[in-house]
Amino acid sequence: MENHNKNIKLVSKKNSRVILPNILTLIGVCIGLTSIKFAFDGKFELSVIAVIVASIIDGLDGRIARLISGTSKVGKELDSLTDVISFGVAPAFIMYFWSLSEIGRLGWLIALIYVICVALRLARFNVSSVGEPSWKDNFFEGVPSPAGGILVLMPLMFSLSGLNIFNVNYNFIVPAFFIITSFLLISKLPTYSLKKIIIPRTMTIFLLFGIVLFFGLLLFYTFKILALSGLVYLILIPISFFHYKKIKKQNTTDASKDENDDLEDIL
């Protein structure tokens, strides 16, 4: 009887570690799809918040999977599918209902192009080569899909924030954001990746304070903070490009120096 009970296992320990991150990923899918429903009902504030929540979950599921050794090929593919829905399809529908529909078929075409670029960006990411120098782990190749989804929502976030200082023509601004973001997604422009950032122990308290302050402000000034955060990210794109070039040049020089030293040792 005891042996029989030991053989009855619904889920092994290894599988349970894999299931938790995948459940989070599926929750992200549901939230991304729900954002489309909110937009269809004209609740654009809730649709934007849903995409933001989906992006937070997207950042957590992978980290949790690595932390508990629950990574899997299924999880990787599921994560990419989730990204296409939450940061490709959902933002495209939200902005189409809000603005792009006013320019007719051209608006729908722009939305389609954006979703295709998100899919291409993720496909390239999934087949990206391994064995790159460790310093390259600090950069993405092109804008990541969660950031792309938030960037195309920026005109809507500015409209909801009340920060419209000038009389903005959204029939021009929204398509421009879609086209520029689509290019950034499939480009090879290096952008900062925070996945492997190392925080010194002495700076931990300041980091925690900054996180608490950010979410506190986000709670009371939601769309203002989101809009300004999008602007900060746009400013960081050229900075990351020049930082990447500087590090690449430095590492190339060091590698050439090491090769010359090895050659001298041989001679």
Image (cartoon, rainbow, N blue to C red):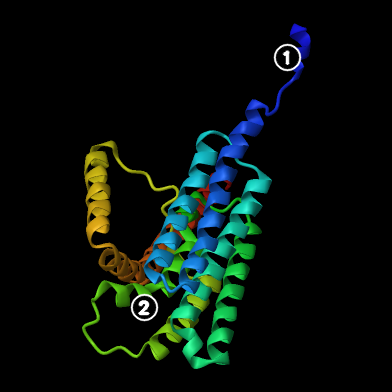
Q: Residue at x 27, y 52 (%)?
A: 215
- In the image, is residue 11 above or below residue 200? above
Residue placed under numbered mark 2 in the picture = 155
Residue 210, x across and y down, in percent: 24, 49
Q: Residue at x 52, y 71 (%)?
A: 185
Q: Please state if 57 lies on the left or on the right of 85 as rendered.
A: left
Residue 82 at least partly seen: yes
How many residues crowd mark 2 within 10 Å: few (<14), some (14–19), many (20+)?
many
SS class, disc 2? helix
Identify residue type, mark 1.
Answer: Lys
Q: Residue at x 59, y 53 (%)?
A: 79
Residue 20: name its quadrant. top right
Q: Which residue lies furthest to the front in this view?
A: 41
Quadrant in the picture for the N terminus: top right
- In the image, is residue 15 above or below residue 118? above
Q: Distance between the residues labelled 1 and 2?
A: 58 Å
Q: Please state if 2 lies on the left or on the right of 133 as rendered.
A: right
Residue 142, x across and y down, in percent: 50, 68
The mark nearer the N terminus, 1 or 2, is 1
How many residues crowd mark 1 within 10 Å: few (<14), some (14–19), many (20+)?
few
